Amino acid sequence: MKTRSAKAIKNVIASMIFKGGTILISLILVPMTLSYLNPYEYGIWLTLSSTLAWIYTFDIGLGNGLRNKLTEALALNDLKLARIYVSTSFFSLLILVTAIYLLFILVQSWLNWELILNVNAQKVQNLSYIVVIVFTFFCASFVLRLIGNIYMAYQQPAINDLLSLIANIVSLILIYLCTVFTEGSLEKVAIIYSAAPVLIFLLAYPVTFWKLKEIRPSVHWVRFSYIKELMSLGIQFFIIQMAGLVLFTTSNLIISRMFGPESVTPYNIAFKYFSLVNTGFAIIIKPIWSAITEAYANKDLIWIRKVMKKLVWIWLGGVLLTLIMVLMSPYVYKVWVGEGIRIPFVLSVFCSFYVSITNWCNIFTYFVNGVGKVRLQLYSSIISGVFFLPLAFFFGSVLGVAGILLALCVCLLPSAVWTPIQYWKIINRKATGIWFK
């Protein structure tokens, strides 16, 4: 128990440092990129990147399935099984992403991205070319990012945060050089932002498996018969991810379609400001998922109870912080991005609601994910995903951009109720039926 707690605390501290650096750089990148592009082009990039982020769900849950199964294998000190899981996951994803990329290239010529993103073709040149370039880098990142799931299975999420920090540093340097030596170019921004993570994860790949030789992926250790074992939990994670993407990544596309690409910019500035609380909370709970998997496998429920109580108190502190951020938001926006972009106060209010609800849900969904009892989360995610789009269009037509956030909050409310109930039932060994699947 002490070793597990010490490892979690150590990673939280390291993650705070690395993630803090990433947050600082991302905040600097917003006004820097806005000074290089105009709000219209910047809105296009935000919409495009969030739309193409859908590709990350096409691992059909193998990433999270590997995370849980690898953690269990390591807890039992079964390194042979661990290596089979890693090798099978890597090569399965490589085959999958190759098929996805070839399919995309085949259908690309029939896709009208100006129409999809509601973009004025006269304002942006070579949009289809930019999409292909970005998609190519996203596909490469698709496989390489599996390294992050491995570090999380080893309860070392701080290393994953370090890689993200380095990628952001590379992006910052390159964007700065562009602002000094070149004219504004959406193409350059898209390439820099999408290529930087690929470069860093590509360099991290040999270093990772030099360090973790015992689980290095090899064709010799591929066992496609184990895909079913990985997928039994992974396919549920996949559906949950798909529903989550409908909730969390289509917002930019909906705003672009309803109000134009330029409206995506103020929405994302407010979202990025309040997501600082999400990010800080994520740093704390990120090691908890795999630690709970290990603790639950070893039947250490006392440790789990203690950790969950601490997380609830931390969440309350986060709620207070978001209230302070709402009051300060007009002044923060003015200093951060200047007076050229107007961000309605109601948008900040709904952002604070969204952040608080999300963090509350994450406390208990991380527990549920860690113990692998995700069936109820699966059904809830599907229902939320189905209702989000009509709610977003309805509230958006009434309240404008802020209505999209209100729709998100409404869709998350059921999870805020049932997740703590499921936790209580499982931890007290009273879970039956759907509560224990």
Image: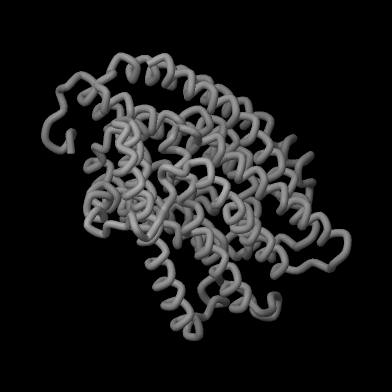
Q: Is residue 153 above or below residue 257?
A: above
For residue 206, side relative to residue 1 (left or right): right
Q: Is residue 156 above or below residue 381?
A: above
User: What residue sits 45% from the left and 31% below the top?
Assistant: 287
Tell me the colour scheme of the image.
one colour
**Residue 107 horizontal/vertical position (percent):** 44, 82
Q: Nearer the viewer, residue 29 or 370?
A: 370
**Residue 213 horizontal/vertical position (percent):** 46, 44
For residue 260, side relative to residue 358 (left or right): right
Residue farthest to the left, as pictured: 433
Q: Is residue 382 visible?
A: no
Q: In the rendered image, which quarter contains the C terminus?
A: top left
**Residue 185 horizontal/vertical position (percent):** 75, 69
For residue 198, side relative to residue 329 (left or right): left
Q: Nearer the viewer, residue 388 or 238?
A: 238
User: What residue sits 53% from the left and 41% below the top?
Assistant: 211
User: What residue sits 69% from the left and 79% below the top?
Assistant: 125
Q: Is residue 35 visible?
A: yes
Q: In the rendered image, which quarter contains the N terminus?
A: top left
**Residue 200 horizontal/vertical position (percent):** 63, 52
User: What residue sits 56% from the left and 61% below the top?
Assistant: 49
For residue 291, side relative to residue 347 (left or right): left
Residue farthest to the right, as pictured: 180
